[in-house]
Image: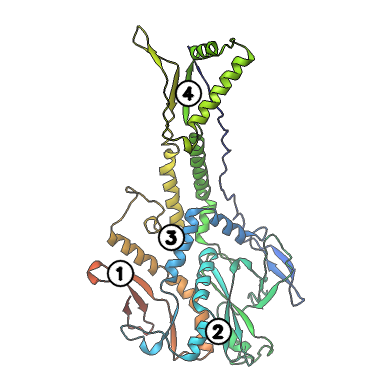
Amino acid sequence: MTESHIINIPRGESLKAVTCGDIYSSPETISTLPVKADDGKTYDIVAWGDDNQLPYDVKEYVEKNSVMAQNKFFNLLTCYARGLEYMDIATMGDKEPKPSKDKDICKFLIRNSMKRFFAEQIVDLKYYFFTVAVIILDRQRKNIVKVVHKEACHCRFEVANKKTGRIEHVLYADWKDNDNPDHVEVIPLLDERDPLGDLLARTGKERDELGIFKPDKMSSAKYAVLMKIPTPGCQYYPIPSYSAVFRDGWYDIYGLLTAAKKAKIKNGQNIRYHVEINTEFWEERARSKGISMGTTAFQNMKDEFIQELKSYLGGSENSDKLLWSEFQSLIDGKERHYIKVNVVDTSKAGNEYNDDVAEASNVLCYDDNVHPNLAGATPGKSQMNNSGSDKRELFTMKQALETLPHDMMMTIHHIIIYFNEWVDKVVPVVPMIMLTTLDQNKDAKQVNLNNNGNGNTEGNN
């Protein structure tokens, strides 16, 4: 007769999955909030989401999902490409167009950290499908001297003017868990459909759309420009296409799967050994120590031995130790052990979820318009690994799809170039990175869009 003991098995944690609920329950419901701004006036803003916390919730849920977080970063990298350049318009017909060397233009780009500004605009466009930039004029309101990025999650739009249908102000503040921030910056918003014309009219360079000459006060030197990817039915805040993953359940499925896999692995690792001890072992051990069976001393002797055995088997410092015990062979050939240690196999704990996790990862990548092979969401020899040629094509296609975001973000740069009278000097370009084949003896080359209509020009990297 044998007696089995389970020694100090920790209770597994309850399943804790990251799920999003229904954060997009009614994203375009017009819910307004009165807000007092720093200029002393009160403005009615349109809440972003039911509780005005939607952008912060989206950001938090993306950060908690490793696939979505990496997808967003990957989209930033591909959209950034070689970075924004103000190309010398005289070289755009050349094989290798060159960035402008104009002193004033170079100074403007450096002083405004234009590379960082471009990356910041991309981040907001990928997360929220819109981005806001603020231009600041000089004292004479003749030139744009400063351009500043405003984080989209902190931007709220004023209720549109009923007569014109235009949103007239952007209110910028930290709205996180607070509908009445201490400091609210109010910024006039240029006409979304014709920001340049609106700016020229406000500064007195041209008449407005009605032919009226009505410039703003000379003290008005700061204006916001809104650039967004169009989405159906949204007048104020766009609904990103990838946000469908929050509504169709796949975000929750991924969270449940990863939580279940973690719990399975953790709980499986808690039980490493199953130890069987023959009851005759206790009798002989008690007899050798002069202890009577069934007494308190007998129970203490058993507990002490089990604790010693547990300490011997557990812990990394006890690895590679030898444990031995005697056993007998009975007349019928069966073995009779005093102590038998069985190793519990936990090497495959949680592996039954691998296919489901890969499926959920692929869906998350699809929602972010990222091929899993490019971002590495489904690693492994059997996970659709493509050839080098296929991956080059995927990378080229991915960069080509960034044309729409680039065009939206070029709005602010076209305004700067035209208003500062640089039209004959530079053109804004985002050179693409084109991966090459080995026979070209270089890893990559850049491809610049030729705005003169002469096709593409290539430059070696």
Distance Cα–Cα, label 3 vs label 4:
52 Å
Q: Residue furthest right?
A: 40
Relative image position of residue 50 (x, y in whole percent) = 66, 58
Q: Which residue does the numbered mark 1 point to in the structure image?
A: 443
Relative image position of residue 218 (x, y in whole percent) = 68, 90
Compare marks 3 and 4 and give the one earlier in the sequence: 4
What residue sits 39% from the left and 82% below the top?
A: 451
Q: Looking at the picture, which amino acid does disc 1 mark?
A: Asp
Q: Indicate which label's residue lies in the foreground, 1 or 3.
A: 1
Q: Which residue does the numbered mark 3 point to in the structure image?
A: 369
Q: Looking at the picture, which amino acid does disc 2 mark?
A: Leu
Label 4 environment density (alpha carbons within 10 Å; few <14, some 14–19, many ≥20): some
Element carrying mark 4: strand
Q: Is residue 328 left or right of residue 233?
A: left
Distance Cα–Cα, label 1 vs label 4:
59 Å
Q: Indicate which label's residue lies in the foreground, 2 or 3.
A: 3
Residue 163 seen in this snapshot:
no
Q: Indicate which label's residue lies in the foreground, 4 or 2.
A: 4
Query: Are the residues flagged by discs 3 and 4 in contact, CB closer than 8 Å?
Result: no
Compare marks 1 and 4 and give the one earlier in the sequence: 4
Relative image position of residue 213 (x, y in whole percent) = 64, 92
Q: Which residue does the numbered mark 4 point to in the structure image?
A: 275
Label 2 environment density (alpha carbons within 10 Å; few <14, some 14–19, many ≥20): many
Which of these two is toward me, 403 or 7?
7
What residue sits 32% from the left and 47% below the top?
A: 382
Q: Is residue 92 above or below residue 321?
A: below
